[in-house]
Image (spheres, rainbow, N blue to C red):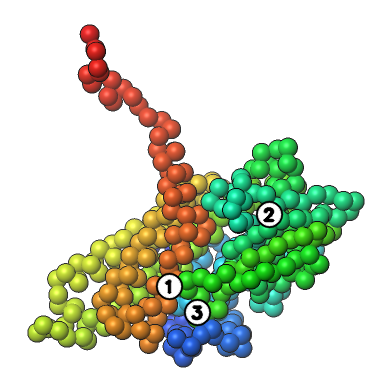
Amino acid sequence: MEYDDPTSGREVAERARAFVREEVIPVEREYLGEGPVPEGELTQLREAARERGVYAPQIPEEYGGMGMDFREVLPVFEAAGRSLLGPAAIRVDAPDEGNMHTLEMVGTDDQKEEWLRPLVEGDVRSGFSMTEPMPGAGSDPKMIRTTAEKDGDEWVIDGHKWWTTQGSEADVLLVMARTDEDAHPYEGCSIFLVPADTPGVEVVRDIPHLGGGLTGGSHAEIKYENVRVPEENLLGEENAGFAIAQRRLGPARLTHCMRFSGMAERALDVAKAYAEERRAFDGTLSDKQALRFEVAEAETRLHAVRTMVRHAARQIAAGEEARIEVAMSKAYAANVAQEAIDTAVQICGGNGIGKDLPLADFYENVRQFRIIDGADEVHKRVIARNAFEDTDRSEVEHLLRFDDE
């Protein structure tokens, strides 16, 4: 299927697909069912990605990336998503990818030198610390309770976060906190760069969770108690935290869509190859109409996802927020990817739930996509609110009402 991606994006995506096929998938197969993959293996893959000209395509060249624009990198992200190890190898993996983008957008030159450059190199890791335990911020972020108070030339952070992805391994945490409790949270929160070894930062635990076996990804519970950081650790403008987060989340949601689209595409590729060979009831599985129709429906929905994401990306590239289009893309892509991978598992039967193929790991990992970066229900709420903004009641004004004369 051809899309209107820029030529440079298509060329790098082709190189990325070859890199994933020839370098990444052999490592993936070696560790399926026996993960996580050692850090040394990942380092070697990143070196290979550099040599093949596919490393950190979304990052400016001055900080070690390839300097590609948003529309150019979309097909590269999809190619990376074909293996759970692909995004980390190409350095387009969450949460670092979104955090690097945030630093690129609003970081000072000093902050970029201290954190963006080593993040791009893969020398350090990061976490975005926003979600809180009940009754704090979750799907409703304005319920945030973590605070940051100014004390001389320092900020003092107190709070309790959890589901901070990669929080246990992070060298730096981007922490969202209330900085003006008299203002609405959307206008009274800020983001701070907090080195993980700062006194008062306590990683309480890694939360046991579904997925992450191959990559070793963690989701941490973290307490911040009297955590002091210098005022220069404020990321972006004071009280602009939610505005910055929204600028971060729009593109991040679309790149998530593309990574998981790549995962779903690979799952279907595996299933089709299996169905071509597996015989039952006097023929191959691929000859069975019911199976062929399921694959056809999955392929059709994936095409719709790719088209929706590219439409939203064009709007973002043109300077628009594209909030509704991003919400539609994210909610739809999450369900399409989950259903496609479920179909692939079913087609492969016992091999689908076994760990000789990547499908079981895909299945475990894709479920989170309907929750992370905004649960389905949050995005549907945004879409529905927009849908009901301009209701034309004249469409039903002629209908009979009770007690009409």
Q: Secondary structure at mark 2?
A: strand
The spot of residue 66 in percent (x, y) is 60, 71
Q: Is residue 133 above or below residue 20?
A: above
Q: Is residue 353 left or right of residue 140?
A: left
* Quadrant in which residue 82 is drawn: bottom left
The residue lying toward the viewer, choosing from 127 and 324, is 127
Q: x, y percentage for residue 289?
A: 14, 71
Identified at 43% across, 32% down, the residue is 389
Give the number of the disc on residue 176.
2
- To which residue does mark 1 refer? 364
Distance between the alpha carbons at the discs numbered 3 and 1: 9 Å
Residue 156 visible within the image:
yes
Check disc 3 and report the residue beneath it.
213
Residue 157 shown left or right of residue 391 in the figure: right
First of labels 3, 2 by sequence position: 2
Q: Mark 1 or mark 2: name the one nearer the start of the chain.
A: 2
Q: Position of residue 236 (x, y in %)?
A: 73, 52
Tell whether 80 sits left or right of 151.
left
User: What residue do we see at 47% from left, 49% from top?
Assistant: 378
Q: Crowding at label 1, few (<14), some or many (≥20) Cα neighbours within 10 Å?
A: some
Q: Nearer the viewer, residue 216 or 123?
A: 216
